[in-house]
């Protein structure tokens, strides 16, 4: 339990809700006397990703957002303006569904049959407990009794890294760019 006396800071901390501290998730909710310490159900998390080797035709704010939509719902970019000295690379905050894997590549295709692969690097991937399957903590910090994830007792992909590659149609992005001009 934390008390934050400065009201604007308290509001900001509560509004953010989920904090990542030392490979664990910290859920922050306003305190109420009749409240419980039950962990809320979480289905999505904001995750910072770095997109690399973005093709020139997609290197715009709209294009980067379109590419990032292959991962989840884009929220914002790291910088308000694109960095011309770092063409083809952008850092984006994406609201990702936890039921989906965290792919290392995004495939972009167009009407001409060209396929571009954009590399994805994650600043952090939420950990999953090997004992209970819970999100945001590891077995050494698990408070629940052991409950294996499957009959073999191990996860097929403990790091959450996917071999599936999401495909994004870049013609939609190109059409939207042409409509704006």
Image (cartoon, rainbow, N blue to C red):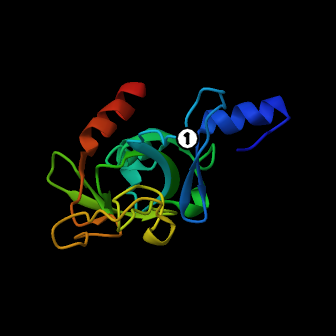
Left or right: 125, with 162 as reference point: right
Q: Residues within 10 Å of mark 1 (few under 14, many from 20)?
A: few
Return the residue nearer the eye: 102 or 176: 102
> How many numbered circles does the render carry?
1
Residue at the image position 61 percent from the left and 41 percent from the top: 28
Query: Going by the picture, which residue comes out furthest to the right?
Result: 5
Quadrant containing the C terminus in the rendered view: top left
Return the residue nearer the eye: 123 or 179: 123
The x and y percentages for residue 113 are 14, 53
Label 1 sits on residue: 37
Up-down relation of residue 7 to residue 58 (above or below): above
Up-down relation of residue 120 to residue 82 (above or below): below
Residue at the image position 60 percent from the left and 65 percent from the top: 22
Up-down relation of residue 81 to residue 106 (above or below): above
Up-down relation of residue 26 to residue 85 (above or below): above
The x and y percentages for residue 144 are 42, 59
């Amino acid at each position: 339990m934390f008390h934050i006396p400065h009201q604007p800071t308290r509001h900001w901390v509560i509004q953010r809700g989920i904090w990542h501290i030392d490979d664990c998730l910290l859920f922050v909710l306003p305190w109420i006397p009749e409240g419980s310490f039950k962990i809320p159900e979480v289905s999505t998390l904001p995750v910072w990703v770095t997109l690399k080797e973005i093709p020139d035709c997609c290197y715009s704010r709209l294009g980067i957002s379109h590419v990032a939509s292959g991962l989840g719902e884009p929220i914002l970019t790291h910088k308000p303006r694109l960095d011309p000295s770092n063409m083809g690379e952008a850092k984006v905050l994406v609201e990702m569904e936890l039921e989906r894997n965290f792919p290392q590549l995004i495939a972009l295709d167009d009407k001409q049959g060209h396929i571009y692969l954009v590399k994805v690097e994650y600043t952090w991937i939420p950990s999953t407990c090997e004992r209970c399957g819970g999100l945001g903590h590891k077995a050494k910090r698990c408070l629940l009794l052991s409950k294996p994830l499957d009959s073999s007792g191990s996860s097929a992909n403990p790091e959450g890294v996917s071999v599936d590659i999401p495909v994004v149609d870049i013609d939609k992005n190109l059409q939207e760019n042409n409509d704006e001009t």
